């Protein structure tokens, strides 16, 4: 019984190790977009330029967040490929 339990625990921990690098990506993407929108809204309120800076910084946040998201996923896939090939 202990052997089966240990194998089960090993497979669960391996699954978490495989998924862990991807777990924070969604939060990071969303946080980047929201923070940039909020900064743009703050600047617009301070200088009475609504909605100029909200749109500019919000768009910048979307592009920056997506760039980082895609770059991170590609780097993680590259690392996984090297690990599976044994190179």
Image (spheres, grey):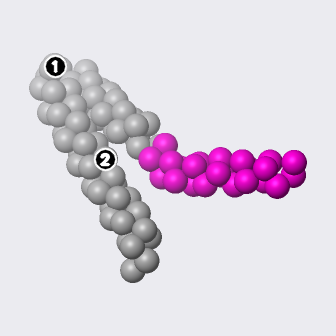
Which of disc 1 and disc 2 is earlier in sequence?
1
Compared across the picture, whether 60 is left or right of 27 comes to left
Give the answer, above or below, for where 31 lies relative to 68. Answer: above
Q: For the magenta stretch, what is the residue range?
A: 1-23
In the image shown, does 22 or 27 lie closer to the viewer? 22
Q: Residue furthest right?
A: 1
Element under label 2?
helix
Label 1 belongs to which residue? Answer: 50
Q: Residue at x 25, y 38 (%)?
A: 61
Residue 63 location (% of width, % of height):
19, 41
Picture mark count: 2
Q: Residue at x 59, y 48 (%)?
A: 16
Q: Residue at x 41, y 43 (%)?
A: 25
In the image shown, does 4 or 20 lie closer to the viewer? 4
Q: Is residue 22 magenta?
A: yes
Residue 72 location (% of width, % of height):
34, 55
Compared across the picture, whether 56 is left or right of 64 comes to left
Give the answer, above or below, for where 6 lies relative to 63. Answer: below
Q: Is residue 7 magenta?
A: yes
Element under label 1?
loop
Q: Quadrant of residue 81?
A: bottom left
Label 2 belongs to which residue? Answer: 69
- Where, quadrant-wise, is the C terminus in this rendering? bottom left
Residue 40 location (% of width, % of height):
24, 30
């Amino acid at each position: 019984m202990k052997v089966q339990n240990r194998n089960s625990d090993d497979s669960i921990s391996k699954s978490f190790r495989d998924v862990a690098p991807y777990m924070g990506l969604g939060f990071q993407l969303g946080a980047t977009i929201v923070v940039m929108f909020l900064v743009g809204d703050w600047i617009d309120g301070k200088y009475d330029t609504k909605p100029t800076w909200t749109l500019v910084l919000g768009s910048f946040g979307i592009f920056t967040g997506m760039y980082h998201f895609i770059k991170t996923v590609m780097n993680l896939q590259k690392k996984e490929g090297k690990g599976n090939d044994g190179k």
